[in-house]
Image (cartoon, grey):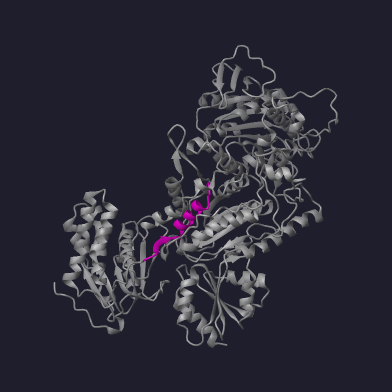
Amino acid sequence: MTSIAKPQIPLLPLERNQLGLTIRDYSGSMSTLCAGCGHDSVTAAIQEALWGLSIPPYQVAKLSGIGCSSKTPQYFDSAAVGFNSVHGRMAAVASGAAAANRGLVVVGVSGDGDSLSIGLGNLAHAIRRNVRMLYVIANNGVYGLTKGQFSASADIGSRSRKGEPNLLPPVDPMLLGLSLGATFLARGFSGDKAQLVPILKAGLSHGGFALVDVISPCVQFNDHEGSTKSFRYVREHELQDIDADIIPVRGQIHSEQTPGSLTEVELHDGSRVLFRAVPEGYDPTDRVRVGSYLVESARQGEIATGLLYLDETTPDMHQVSATTEERLWDLPFQRLCPGSAELAKFQARLR
Amino acid sequence: MAKVQLPEAPSRARVNEFAIKLANVNGTGSASTNNLLMQTIFRMGVPVSGKNLFPSNIQGLPTWYEVRVSQSGHTARTSSFDLMVAMNGQTYQQDIAEVASGGYLVYDDSWPLDQEMRRPDITFLGAPLAQLCAQRFATVKERILMKNVATAGLVAALLALPVDELSKQLVAAYSRRPQLLEDNQAALQLGYQYALENFSCPLPFHVEQMGAPDGRILIDGNTAVALGAVFAGATVGAWYPITPATSVMENFIRLCAQYRRHPGPDGREVNDYLILQAEDELAALGIVVGASWAGARAFTSTSGPGLSLMQELLGLAYYTEVPAVVVDVQRAGPSTGMPTRVQQADLLSAAFASHGDTRHILLFPSDPSECFRHTVQAFDLAERFQTPVLVMSDLDIGMNDWEVPELTWDDSYRPDRGRLLGPEELERLEHFWRYGDPDPEWTTPRAVPGETPLAGHLVRGSGHDFRAVYTERPDEYQEVVDRLLRKHRAAAEHLPPPVVELREGAPFGVITMGSCDLAVREALEELPGPSPSYLRITGYPFPPAVAEFIDAHPHCYVVEQNRDGQLRSLLLIDTGVGGERLRPVLSYGGLPITASFIQDRILEQESSK
């Protein structure tokens, strides 16, 4: 549940997914974020994506760091076990959880401060490890809980509520991810759920680290004239050239429209991503072209959104490590402990 | 060359009771000499210890290896050497000064020794090892490497070590490289024969066979920790390389490859483990906390600087009640300190790691055998008490070979997973509250992600009530933190029991921990007057026996290897005893503590009262 209390008895019967669950079965407690906060829309989109893919709610492990965005795991999927960890370390904690149990659907929610400042190192290396998880950055360019300092994603010249310009260049998680070998890069806008939900679904079906940067305006501290992360600015400058659909293998309710797709990529779980429309010469599997497109659009002052880059061929953390397909955490002890006879044998050469 | 006549020195004619030191340049392969000698003496059934004093450097700086042979079992470090094998011109001065009066010094007389350096009270034995190797071996690299083996041969002759045994070890090491083996054997004989022909061998102090080392092994603490982690069923390891802890995880990697690999469905090898070399220690512990939260037995190994970085996550694990095992192989601090020197100086920062009111469980192994057992126990304690457990090893235990009784394993052992509830158990509960329904030891039910809708909850490092729900209410907050304190106290009874040796009429007690054990025991044996009582603390929180021991003596000496008396501070904080009752004996120069240091400090303070 997000910021608005829903009637106990719905006006219309709620749609059910393949598990027979409604969207409400994926809800959490009432949000305590500010009214109109972009993050609540992100929460709602995550909830819808989980529901739409018919992922059993308890199979999700939700994690976050510290900040406004990191409060949101409380607001979706109450049936899941979650971990609101410490500032900047969610990527590491999530890596550990994914290591222990490869059956988990790991969903991490973070912010621009949590991911691009204090946690940049941990994020970078979780990308390199290609941990299989959905990693959402609710990106508003500002520190909300401490009342309005610029974050590392603030654009040069973007103004604070008091009118001071930001002087330092922004960290763009998409360009960062490209340089680190990320395998799934997407950018959405909290004000555009129709685009965001399919992106999140694709991220959840991806066989590696799915980084989704969601521009999510802060209504309190960064939604004014002069800010480049305001609702209006993003609406006016959003570039939606890259149009992709996901055809999930599970939980499909409506067949999504896919006329004239240019590129098709099959995801880890057999779902397919169909790129319906992309700019001339754009190839969402070509790191170099995606990079130049992102740099060029940023130079034009535009915010490129969509599923920007996809690589389904790079092995994930477990594949690289040749880990057993079983879950590590509850492997039978007999298989893990070599036993006294082996200990004696081992010590033969220490005698 | 005329045979050097060795002076009669009956006072030093001590069979199986002496110490030697080998001075070398690091990065030249001298470790092979050290191992050959150490192994051979060990196999002759004589108690022996080896201390590797190495620089934080790859090549070119001085390095020493100290071997103490003691049939009476006194194998703590000593600072008095009967034989110095001085193979490093840079350190001649210091090395010559360290030889005990009446002792011997071997040097390479391929180059002349400055006459001014000579001491009249010790015997100089010159051997042209570099020349001999230059004649026998073609390349510079070979000459440098083989000089070490020749040195081993020379020392073997001086100490009456069976050269066949050394030779056998070379066969074992190089059986697959015949050329290298041949070179090694030749070099061994070069040194051995030279000594026999030119010196009166053996020296008055030397080694005599004492029987086979039955039931004993030679092992370093870091290998033992890694074995413990494998046997305890750890499946996730995360780490960042740091001296002197690096070989913990390197051994874990090696052992897992040996014991935890099997053919998968497609015939390719799959691993029943996952080890991640993290980007820093923050991430290493973050990974461990995440993996433990998701149910795995996970651990990390580190040293002082890494422990500093882990503080925040230790606080997180403490407050969210997630198990975590951290092995801290302590080195000399503060800051970077001396990475290749030993201290026990992380005690306070480990006991109270992280801001806010935190207290952690610490274990103090005293040798590699306890490293093995304590590591296994650390996993049980961490899961039972749902909290971090720190195994406080140190560089001396971790990186030196120690002679210990063969490790044993009880095949009926099963991991203690504490109150980790599965779907069926959750089904039987009316409500699952993560921090509710404490048991008599104040632990609460725990559930991992991914199992059942009945387990839904969100743990957090922010203020929470018994349901794990965010709170800022004083009563709800205090309920949780008060329980954490009680839980920590309850753990005391489950730690390895302290070693208490009360002596009738003891004038005082001596308290210590960890790697000080052997040196303290040796010091106490040789103290004049009635025997003091002995207490070796094995863990924190302290069980009641610790305060009882202090109460039973007018005063106690607390022997430890740090500047500030950290164990003493912890005792003062937790037992409420007055400061004057606990007298510090502190060794913190970075070299392992010696018995003579402890004796001197105790006698000094006893005589000044």
Q: Is residue B336 above or below residue B468?
A: below
Q: Residue reaching furthest top?
A: A260
Q: Is residue B269 left or right of residue B26?
A: right
Residue B234 locus on image (x, y percent): 53, 49
Which corner quadrant of the image does residue B486 belong to? bottom right
Boundaries of the magenta span: B214-236
The foreground one among B324 and B431 is B431
Q: Is residue B476 left or right of residue A275?
A: right
Which residue is depicted at the point 21% across and 57% down?
B185
Q: Quadrant location of the C terminus of chain A? A: bottom left
Q: Is residue A81 left or right of residue A101?
A: right
Q: Quadrant location of the N terminus of chain A? A: top right
Which corner quadrant of the image does residue B359 belong to? bottom right
Any part of residue B335 in sight = no
**Magenta includes B235?**
yes
**Magenta includes A132?**
no
Q: Residue reaching furthest left?
A: B1
Tally of numbered discs: 0
Residue B21 locus on image (x, y percent): 34, 69
Which residue is depicted at the point 67% across and 16% down?
A255
Which corner quadrant of the image does residue A199 belong to? top right
Residue A135 locus on image (x, y percent): 63, 35
The foreground one among B184 and A153 is B184
Q: Residue reaching furthest front?
A: B412
Any part of residue B541 in sight = yes
The foreground one among B423 and B512 is B423
Q: Is residue A285 above or below residue B304?
A: above
Residue B91 locus on image (x, y percent): 33, 67
